[in-house]
Amino acid sequence: MKLAEQDQNQLINIVDTLVEASEHFLALTRDKKYTESIYIFSSIIEGYTAVQNMINKDQELKQSLSTYENKITNNFKTISTTIENNELIKTTETLQFILFLP
């Protein structure tokens, strides 16, 4: 089933918000604000889950984005591990790598 135009627009808005949140998350990790970093990372995961749920409604879209889904999931795991180990410098490095390199 194809996503309706309204769902597509909502998906775009959520993704835009996730990009902004990711940039803010990067700034928080640079400033070594551990607690705030955890909160915003949790929000990013929630937003990503909402996006993923919408994408799953469109099998063609889901299939075309499957490679990215795997990369994003792996990046979330890496970031989670560095946060759990209170390694915000490593978290920052990881974020810089995944946010700014093609």
Image: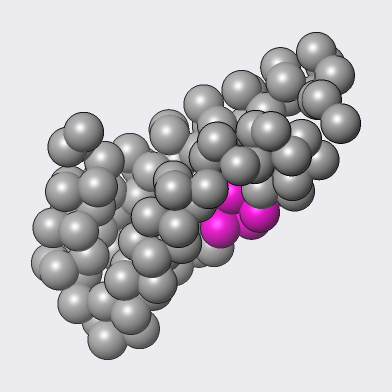
Question: Which quadrant, please, contains the C terminus?
Answer: top left
Q: Main secondary structure of the magenta part?
A: helix
Most distant residue in the bottom direction = 85
Most distant residue in the top direction = 5
Residue 61 belongs to magenta span:
no
Q: Quadrant of residue 90?
A: bottom left
Say if residue 35 shows up in the picture.
Answer: no
Query: Number of labelled discs?
Result: 0
Between 88 and 95, the residue placed more toward the observer is 95
Q: What residue sits 74% from the left and 39% below the top?
A: 59
Please provide percent x and percent y for residue 94: 20, 58
Question: Which quadrant, please, contains the N terminus?
Answer: top right
Q: Is residue 100 above or below residue 81?
A: above
Between 43 and 11, the residue placed more toward the observer is 11
Say if residue 86 shows up in the picture.
Answer: yes
Q: Quadrant of residue 13?
A: top right
Q: Is residue 74 above or below residue 86?
A: above
Q: Is residue 26 left or right of residue 12?
A: left
Q: What residue sits 35% from the left and 61% below the top?
A: 75
Q: Is residue 33 left or right of residue 74?
A: left
Please provide percent x and percent y for residue 20: 43, 33
Q: Is residue 11 above or below residue 27?
A: above
Please provide percent x and percent y for residue 61: 65, 33
Q: Quadrant of residue 34?
A: bottom left
Please provide percent x and percent y for residue 35: 40, 70
Residue 45 belongs to magenta span:
yes
Q: Is residue 2 above or below residue 84?
A: above
Q: What's drawn in magenta, residue-wise? A: 44-49
Q: What residue sits 64% from the left and 41% below the top?
A: 62
Between 14 and 88, the residue placed more toward the observer is 14
Q: Is residue 12 left or right of residue 54?
A: left
